[in-house]
Amino acid sequence: MAKRPHHWAAWSWLLALAVSSAVVADPAPAPTLTNALGMTLRLIPGGSFQMGCNPATASDEQCDGSEQPAHSVTLSPFYLATTEVTQRQWVAVMGNNPAYFQSDAADLDRPVEQVSWDDAQAFIQALNQHPELGGGYRLPSEAEWEYAARAGTTTPYWFGTGADEAHLKAHLWYLFSSGERTHPVGTKPANPWGLFDIHGNVFEWVSDCYHPNYQGAPSDGQPWSSDCERLNDGARVRILRGGAWYLYPNGARSAFRFRYAPTVRHYGFGLRVARAVTTPEPSIK
């Protein structure tokens, strides 16, 4: 039998290495995931942005002291739900509906509200107990939320400065457009990264605890959970983002921060879920 050339062994080793690399390489994350509950999550690309409000450069924006100093944050990719958690999704997981704005089946597509931070954590824990949904759900960090809300923009809202009232009414549910109630999710335009109601409708809890300003804030997008402002009982004060149906538009700016006790339920408080990219994909609907 003819003898193989000496270079055959080298080529065989390279071929085996290539096959092995192809097998272990992580596939590119899907741009969109939809689980069996009908929750759709968009892949938010990693990147850097200026978090907070800079009064020296802000356009038509009143910077609050808690939004300063503006600072650079660099984040890894993550998934974020395209809508706030709906009453329908909450009922499917928790078996009850705490929402104030419910009267018929059509209301199930409104965001769930009257949800405290503690309630939001209980919902996420229950969500992660359903293996068919993939697991790994959580609240976004405050930095993740603002980064996703801005979607590469630097204006007070992703759609502009908000100086024109007609423009505001076209893009968010707030005091002068809501009719004094919540509205079904996804009925206003999505931001450039496909997120609906990131401004208005209901406030959204984030995972961080509250600090009165951004001095010493993390620069990597992780939740800020140390040296928090606390209540008299020692509980950590928590943060809500995005504004709500009953507020003036200033409270819906991308940089605006609102704080409350973790046990408080209010008809303007809801949530939006996040998920790590490295978590196994949920069952596709």
Image (cartoon, rainbow, N blue to C red):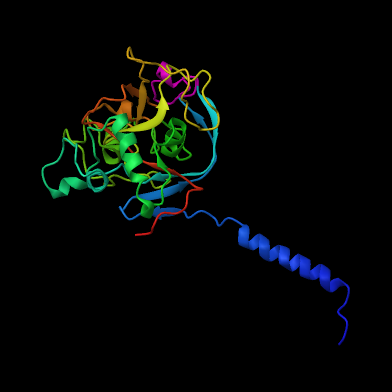
Residue 75 location (% of width, % of height): 53, 37
Q: Is residue 74 visible?
A: yes
* Residue 57 magenta: yes
Whether 262 is among the magenta residues is: no
* Residue 172 rendering spot, x and y as whole percentages: 28, 38
| Quadrant housing residue 213 | top left
Q: Which of 51 and 238 lies nearest the eye of the viewer?
A: 238
Could you tell me if residue 254 is visible in this image?
A: no
Q: Is residue 51 above or below residue 231?
A: below
Q: Residue at x 58, y 55 (%)?
A: 26
Where, quadrant-wise, is the N terminus in this rendering? bottom right
Check the image and report above or below for 194 versus 233. below
Q: Residue at x 35, y 38 (%)?
A: 198
Please, which residue is most extreme toward the top here? Answer: 232
Q: Position of residue 206 (x, y in %)?
A: 38, 32
Secondary structure character of the magenta stretch overall: loop
Q: Is residue 260 left or right of residue 23?
A: left
Q: Position of residue 191 (x, y in %)?
A: 39, 43
**What residue is shown at x 51% (from left), y 48% (from top)?**
278
Q: Please determine whether, in this image, residue 62 is positioned above or below residue 127.
A: above
Q: Which residues are magenta?
A: 53-69
Viewport quadrant of the C terminus: bottom left
In the figure, is residue 185 to the left or right of 13? left
